[in-house]
Amino acid sequence: MSRQKEVILGVLRAQRFHPTADEILLRARQRMPALALGTVYRNLKALCDEKKVRRIPMEDAPDRYDGFVEPHDHLVCTVCGKVYDVPPLQSKEALEAKLATHVDGYELKVYFTCPKCQAKN
Amino acid sequence: MSRQKEVILGVLRAQRFHPTADEILLRARQRMPALALGTVYRNLKALCDEKKVRRIPMEDAPDRYDGFVEPHDHLVCTVCGKVYDVPPLQSKEALEAKLATHVDGYELKVYFTCPKCQAKN
DNA sequence: ATGAAAGTGATAATCATTCCTATTTTATTA
DNA sequence: TAATAAAATAGGAATGATTATCACTTTCAT
């Protein structure tokens, strides 16, 4: 594991948040100023392959990344875009039972308006 | 509703499939050869706003569009990318109960290997 | 017909992500 | 330790889906 990869994983595990590649770059550069965006993307892909990081594909915004990989789903605010963790709302097993097929995985995003954004109206 | 918009909606309702904007353009041009890709995108967005069409955001491929908007979810083959319809696997109400919040909607994609692709191995 | 409003086709711009490559770092072996 | 091979990096260019722009056409109410 290269020093760059360690720093990137460190950023993602430092707190429970869901940053974009750009945001990861910003934070990682505090410790490693010459880090390149391409390196961030390359290592994020590798970390996802190794199941150490999870990618959260966003529909109309840059993808986000999650350093916590125990099963959970995501609540996305339609106003500010912030992502919140919630306990698993589905299970592969339940889906396999309902669908009567083998299932490789699933991606569930629930949209809502977060308390902060609700308060603004 | 412009002639272009009608043709685009016609393509999507002609059969139960999940084409990309490009594929829609190809088919629509059989009836309207001068149709432009930008016009396809513009009208798809409008049709989605009007809830006549549903967009299926794809993670690593062009988005797909669905001319059938009654509630249902999607099964996506991880090998060939084909999208299959399945009865709703979730409901807004169930999610609201579990999460104890108002929910605007959800997007669920279940990944599997379709029978055709399984047969190839 | 006329003028305003809406829509179009063609093309350029955007921007997240990937690709390329010369260089640097790391690991290996003598 | 020096030499060498392998892997990874930084930086910048390329890609490609989608959106924006704009001159021109169509629609439609007057």
Image (tube, coloured by chain):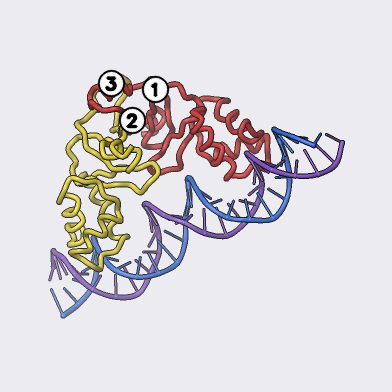
Chain colours: A red, B yellow, C blue, D purple
Q: Nearer the viewer, residue B43 or D16?
A: D16
The answer to whether residue A112 is visible is no
Q: Name the residue under label 1.
A: A86
Q: Mark 1 lies on which chain?
A: A
Quadrant (top left, top right, bottom left, bottom right) of the N terminus of chain B? bottom left
Q: Which of A63 and B50 is in front in this view?
A: A63
**Amino acid type, mark 1:** Val
Question: In the figure, B113 relative to B25: above or below?
Answer: above
Q: Where is residue A62 in the image (x, y as percent from the top left)?
A: 46, 42
Q: Residue at 27% across / 55% down in the picture?
A: B23
- Secondary structure state at the residue bearing disc 2: strand
- Secondary structure state at the residue bearing disc 1: strand
Q: Which chain carries label 2?
A: A
Q: In which quarter of the image is residue C10?
A: bottom left
Q: Name the residue under label 2.
A: A110
Q: Name the residue under label 3.
A: A94
Q: Which chain carries label 3?
A: A
The answer to whether residue A86 is visible is yes
Q: How crowded is mark 3: few (under 14 residues within 10 Å), some or many (20 or more)?
A: few
Q: In which quarter of the image is residue B72?
A: top left
Q: Do labels 3 and 1 share a chain?
A: yes
Q: Residue at 28% across / 44% down in the picture?
A: B55
| Residue A84 in the figure: left or right of residue B74 | right
